[in-house]
Amino acid sequence: MNVGDQLPPIEVRITREQLVRYAGAALDFNPIHWNEAFAKEVGLPDVIAHGMLTMAIAARVVTDWLGDPGRLLDFSARFTRPVVVPNTEEGALVEFSGKVGDITDDGIARIDLVAKFDGKTVLGKPQALVRV
Amino acid sequence: MVPWASSQLAVPAFWGGSFAVDSLNGVPLDQSFIGRTYPPETSYEVSREKIREFADAIGDTNPVYRDPEAARAAGYPDVIAPPTFLTIINLASINSIVTDPELGLDYSRMVHGDQGFSYTRPIHAGDVLRLTTYIDHIMARAGNDFISLRADITDAAGERLCTTRAQLVVRGEDA
C-alpha cells in the first residue's frame, strides 16, 4: 500500500426497488425515500436515496479492496447533495472511487473517497481509516 | 406521521457557506440539553438474517457477511455486519431523542448533516448491543440549529464496540 494508490472504483445504479429494500433493511421509512408526492411537497425534485445507503456503498469501495472489513477503524462522511432517483429501470447512476491519502508511522492509512452523481460529489469528505 | 431523522434534504449550503447572515427563526433548541446522556432502554440482538438482509440491500456480496464458515476462516466467531449496519440502532436512538418535546426540535425540518463510526471490532451475529447516546453540542448559526450526538455501542460484556457520531441540522424557516 502506497500513498496515491487508487482503489478499484464501483458504479451503482440506485433504483426505487433498492430504496424500498434498503428502507426495510435499515428500518428507515422516511417517505422522501419512497413517496414521490411527499418528496415534491417538501421541495425535492423527486424521491432521493438515503444518505446512509450512499455512505454504505462508499464503504464497499474500501472493504472490497481490503477483503477483511475488520481492518476498517473509522468511517465518516457529510451529506452534501441528494441522489435523485427517478422511477425508471436505470435509476440513478452513482460512481464511487477512492485513493490512499496518507499512511502514518503507526500503520494506519487514510482513504479519501469520492461519490459522484450527475457529475457532482454527493458526500462531503468521505473518509476511512484502515489498518495497513 | 412516523417520526424520522434520516438523510438529507435538498442542498442546504450552510456548511462552508457564510455564517454572517443572522436571522431569528422560531425558537432555538434548548441549550440545557448539551451534555445530556440517554442510557440504553433496551438491547438489540444481531442476527445472521438481519445482516444478510442489510448486505443484500447495499448490494454487498462479501462472504464474511453471509457465510459463517467464511467468517470463521477470517477469524470471526460468526458472520460479521457491514460497517454501516449500526445505523439501524443509531437511527432509532436519534429518533427517540429528537422527538423529545422538551428539546423543541421540529423534525420535519431536520436533515442528517454528517455521520461517523469509530470501530473497536466488527459487530457479529449473536452480539447483544446496547447503546448510550450523548448530546455533545447544540448551536445556532445563520438561522439553523445544529445538534451533535455521539453514541457508544457496547456488547453484553460492556465492551465498547463502536462510537457513532452524527450532526443533525434543523433548517430555519428562511434557511
Image (cartoon, coloured by chain):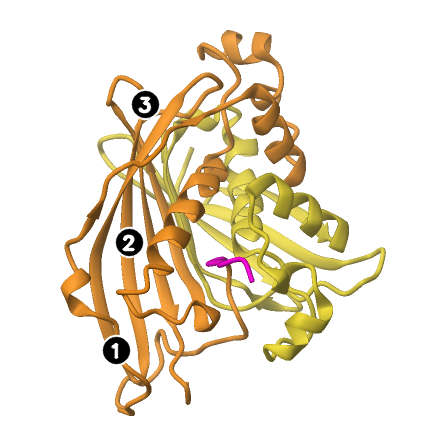
Labels 3 and 1 within one chain: yes
Q: Which chain is yellow?
A: A
- Residue, disc 1: B28
Comparing B124 with B103, the one in front is B103
Look at the image and tell me in which quarter the C terminus of chain B lies: bottom left
Report the side of B107 relative to A30 (left or right).
left
Please name whichever residue, B112 or A76, is drawn nearer the observer in this view of the structure. Answer: B112
Task: Compare marks 2 and 1 and give the one earlier in the sequence.
Answer: 1
Q: Label 3: how many residues lie within 10 Å, few (<14), some (14-19) or many (20+)? A: some
Q: Amino acid at mark 1?
A: Pro
Magenta segment: B1-6
Of callouts 3 and 1, which one flags the residue occurring earlier in the amino acid sequence?
1
Task: Tell me, yes or no, whether the two marked residues, 2 and 1, touch with CB atoms within 8 Å.
Answer: no
Q: Position of residue B122 (x, y in %)?
A: 41, 25
Amino acid, disc 3: Asp
Q: Tell me which residue sits at (27%, 48%) in the image.
A: B150
The alpha-carbon separation of the residues under discs 2 and 1 comes to: 17 Å
Name the residue tied to disc 2. B149
Q: Residue B113, located in which quarter of the rendered image? A: bottom left
Q: Earlier in the sequence, mark 3 or mark 2?
A: 2
Q: Secondary structure at mark 1?
A: loop
Q: Quadrant of the N terminus of chain B?
A: bottom right
Around disc 1, counting alpha carbons within 10 Å, would you say few (fewer than 14), some (14 to 19), or many (20 or more)?
Answer: some
Eyeballing the image, is B35 above or below A85?
above
**Residue B77 to residue B119: above or below:** above
Q: Nearer the viewer, mark 3 or mark 1?
A: 1
- In the rendered picture, chain B carries what hue? orange
Mark 3 highlights which residue?
Answer: B155
For disc 1, the chain is: B
Identity of the amino acid at label 2? Leu
